Amino acid sequence: MLNIVLFGPPGAGKGTQSERLIEKYGLIHLSTGDIFRANIKGETELGVLAKSYIDKGQLVPDEVTINMLRSEVLNHKEAKGFIFDGFPRTNAQATALDQFLAELNTSISVMLALEVEENELKSRLTKRAEVSGRADDANPEVIANRIHVYNNETAPVKDFYQSQNKFVSIDGIGSIDEISTRLYTAIDNH
Ligand code: AMP
């Protein structure tokens, strides 16, 4: 299996690039943000809980997020591989992911980290708000909090994969095509 963690701060281009990667490599796309938003739309119990965190730019608690992702993975046992987009966002999530991939006799192949500096992220997210309809993109304070949470809680997950020799840094500035090519090269060389 080819299992990719597509990593990066909010606004780095994970969603856009995931679409390219799933097509090229035939992977199942699991975006925790998308799954939460679908639950919010469907007004499920999980959606109501997730919304209370997402609206503030905070992380949904690990236990809830891990259980949700675990059942999504187990629902796709036949997959050629997965692209994890927006997960793991904490070291506890990364540890849990290793454990349940081991249950399927597989593991993470590579973590691709899109690197984009903070001012560029803020301007991309503000622009994205005009089309995404996402409340968490429309409020500058929530954007700032999401970046803060990324720097404090999520960025350390890079070290988790670095220690397994699976971390690859990707320059996230450039055209969508240029960045896709960098990702393809990193995957094919891994
Ligand atoms: P995203 O679409 O990846 O930007 O995620 C939107 C929001 O969903 C985040 O700001 C978090 O509140 C929540 N979220 C998404 N993925 C996770 C995760 N792995 N752990 C905790 N919260 C998450």
Image (tube, rainbow, N blue to C red):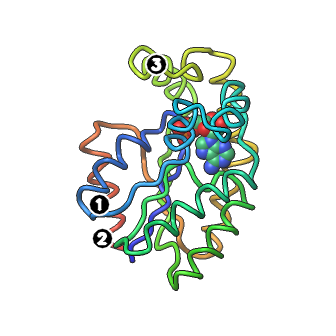
SS category of the residue bearing label 3 = loop
Q: Residue at x 43, y 23 (%)?
A: 132
Disc 1 Cβ-to-ligand 1 distance below 8 Å: no
Asked if 168 appears above or below 12 in the picture, the reply is below
The local crowd at label 1, few if under 14, some if 14 to 19, many if 20 or more residues have their Cα within 10 Å, is some
- For the C terminus, the image quarter is bottom left
Which one is nearer the viewer's eye here, 101 or 51? 51
Q: Residue at x 47, y 38 (%)?
A: 12
Q: Residue 29 carries which label?
A: none
SS category of the residue bearing label 2 = helix
SS category of the residue bearing label 1 = helix
Asked if 166 appears above or below 46 in the picture, the reply is below
Amino acid on which the number 3 mark rests in the picture: Gly
Q: Quadrant of ligand 1?
A: top right
Q: Are marks 3 and 2 in contact (CB under 8 Å)?
A: no
Amino acid on which the number 2 mark rests in the picture: Asp
Q: Which of marks 3 and 2 is nearer the N terminus?
A: 3
- Name the residue tied to disc 2: 188
Q: Distance between the residues labelled 3 and 2?
A: 35 Å
- For the N terminus, the image quarter is bottom left
Can you tell which quarter of the image residue 80 is in?
bottom left
Asked if 50 appears above or below 83 in the picture, the reply is above
Amino acid on which the number 1 mark rests in the picture: Tyr
- Name the residue tied to disc 3: 133
Can you tell which quarter of the image residue 4 is in?
bottom left
- Name the residue tied to disc 1: 184
Q: Could you say where residue 131 lies in the image, as x and y percent from the top left?
A: 38, 18
Q: Which residue is drawn at 37% across and 75% down?
A: 78
